Structure formats: C-alpha cells, structure tokens
Amino acid sequence: MKIRWLFSGRLIMNEKGIEMIYKVFYQETKERNPRRENTHSLYLDIDAKDELEGRIKARKLVEEKTPYNVELITLLSDKHLEYEKESGNFTITEL
C-alpha cells in the first residue's frame, strides 16, 4: 500500500522516498548532431531518495525505452511546474 502526502502540488512522499517531476530535453535520434531547433521535452514522475538519484533514474529510463538523445534533465520547482501546467503542454510521460 502506497501512502502519499501531497504538498505544494509537487512532492509526494511514499514508502520509497519522494516522487519528483523531471523535465527531460532530448533529440529524437542519436544519429544526428543536436540542433536547438529540434529539441523536444517530456515530463517524468520519478520515485527517488534525492534529486541526483531521480536524474539517474530518469536518464536510464529514457535511454532504455526510447531512441532519444538526452540533452538535459532538470527537476521542476513548484513555480516551474505551475508554469508548465498553465502552458497547456504538460503531460506526464509513461515509459
């Protein structure tokens, strides 16, 4: 049974640690050199003990499940998460 406490709309405690929302910037292929104009992003909800563990898990998940070339992984702050939700493009990706 998962026990969760939601605060500030982002961090959720459970028996494993904290669920954090990461924004992953990527190129669709590893075959071409990255170009800023072709950068895409996705959002992942990761269970982790801390930010570093979350980044490692996010990178591993994207690299194992997709052909994407990961450029940057960033933990979203509460304000950044609210902005992303208001922009209309926010959807958690299930990999």
Image (cartoon, rainbow, N blue to C red):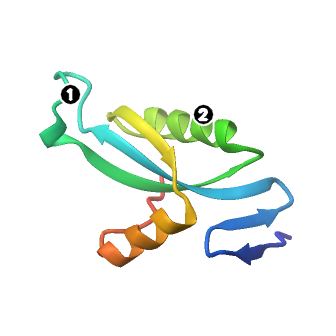
Badge 1 density bin: few <14, some 14–19, many ≥20, Cα 10 Å: some
| Residue kind at label 2, given as amino acid type | Ile
Q: Which residue is mark 1?
A: 34
x then y, percent, for residue 95: 48, 51
Give the number of the disc on residue 19. none
**Which residue matches tag 2?**
56
SS under mark 2: helix
Q: Which residue is at 20% across, 27% downward?
A: 34
Q: Residue at x 32, y 39 (%)?
A: 26
**At x 82% / y 53%, what residue is drawn?**
16
- Within the image, what quadrant is residue 67 found in? top left
Residue 91 coordinates in the image, percent (x, y)? 40, 68
| Amino acid type at image mark 1 | Pro
Q: x and y percent of residue 52 in the render? A: 66, 36
Q: Which of the pair 10/31 is nearer the observer?
A: 10
Measured along the vertical axis of the image, is residue 21 above or below residue 82? above
Where does the N terminus fall, quadrant-wise? bottom right
| Residue 80 percent location from the top left of the image | 46, 63
| Gap in angstroms between the C-alphas marked 1 and 2 | 21 Å
In the rendered view, tell whether residue 31 sits above or below residue 55. above
Name the secondary structure under disc 1: loop
- Give me the residue at 80% from left, 54% from top: 17
N-term mark: 1 or 2: 1
Residues 2 and 41: in front is 41
Q: Is residue 26 left or right of residue 35?
A: right
